[in-house]
Amino acid sequence: MRIIGHIKQIDMFRAATESGKIHSAYIFVGQSGIGKKLFTLKVAQMLNCQETNIKRRPCGLCSQCKKIETGTHPDFITISVLEDKSWISIEQIREMIKGLQYGSVMGGYNIRVIDEAHLIKPEAANALLKILEEPPKNTVVILITPMPKSLPQTILSRSAIVYFNIFSDAEIRDELKDFNLDEDELNFVSSLAMGSLGKAIELAKDRKFIDEYKNILADFKEGKFVNKRYERNEAVEFLNMLASQVRFRQPEKLGVVLKMRDFIRRNTNIGLTLEVLRLSL
């Protein structure tokens, strides 16, 4: 398992593992696509690795490390919004707490990850608080969210908050070198990704999308996209893409694009707004 970037976070957890000063609850904060979920695997491996030299953890080779990486470790479980639901329910949290009270199956740390923790229902958050106040031995709960302020203050105050930064354009471009993109395509994908490596990789795989939009600014100026029939949310997303190129090629015009995007959000005529924007560019 390869973690890209986040060196400070890795060093922090390695030091905590060596000193034995592990918090019972963490909140991982950062936008989507920057590796927060993958990083929880790294943490779980550090804590449960069978390598006797703590400085060499995780080894990635022992049975504990392999089970965590393949998602088959009984003490490393992720809770997320169910497919037919919009929230993390109190039933899910109660089931999680029940499992933690039985202790670790494999004798190491019992780790639970709550993905999209900002979608936890208030009553579920209250139930979670009980386990944070009196955590069983060798228990670690990790909440992942881009919006920590949406969580109750009682949970925030009982958790160690770890911030994850976005990736630089250079880091993203380096990771996309195997996708055989030319310079303009690399610029387009990295600018549209806005620091999210996960999004950049997803975009790099979509050859049809790249071919259609890589010259979005030049094509828009020529009127290519102006008369297309957009739903309002599609028009907003289109202007987000346009803004990503304008930011690099005509930064003095970025404010105009964002202003027109906001006009469209407020129910102005989409076609007319796009034509006014085209003339402004």
Image (cartoon, helix red, strand yellow):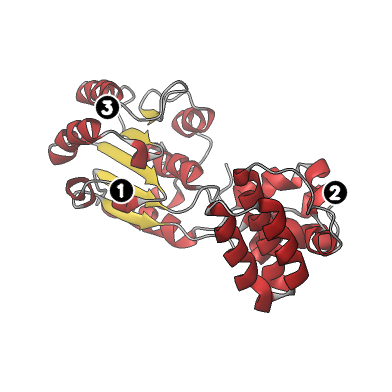
Q: In the structure shown, which secondary structural element does the residue marked by tag 3 occupy?
A: helix
- At numbered mark 2, what does the secondary structure look like: helix, strand or loop? helix
Whole-percent x, y for residue 7 in the image: 49, 60
Residue 211 marker: 2
* Label disc, if present, on residue 150 of the rendered structure: 1
Q: Position of residue 222 (x, y in %)?
A: 87, 62
Compare residues 194 and 157 and report the one nearer the observer: 194
Counting from the top left corner in percent of width and height, residue 216 is at 79, 58
Which residue is located at x 66 percent, y 63 percent?
A: 243
Residue at 44%, 46% (x, y): give it. 57
Instruction: Read off the residue under disc 3.
Output: 93
Q: How many marks do you count on the picture?
A: 3
- Name the N-terminal-most of marks 2 and 1: 1
Q: Nearer the viewer, mark 1 or mark 3?
A: 1
- Mark 1 vs mark 3: which is more N-terminal? 3
Query: Relative to residue 75, is residue 33 depicted above or below?
Result: below
Sequence-earlier tag: 2 or 3: 3
Query: Position of 213 compared to 237: left or right?
Result: right
Mark 1 Cα-neighbour bin, 10 Å: few <14, some 14–19, many ≥20: few
Name the residue type under label 2.
Asp
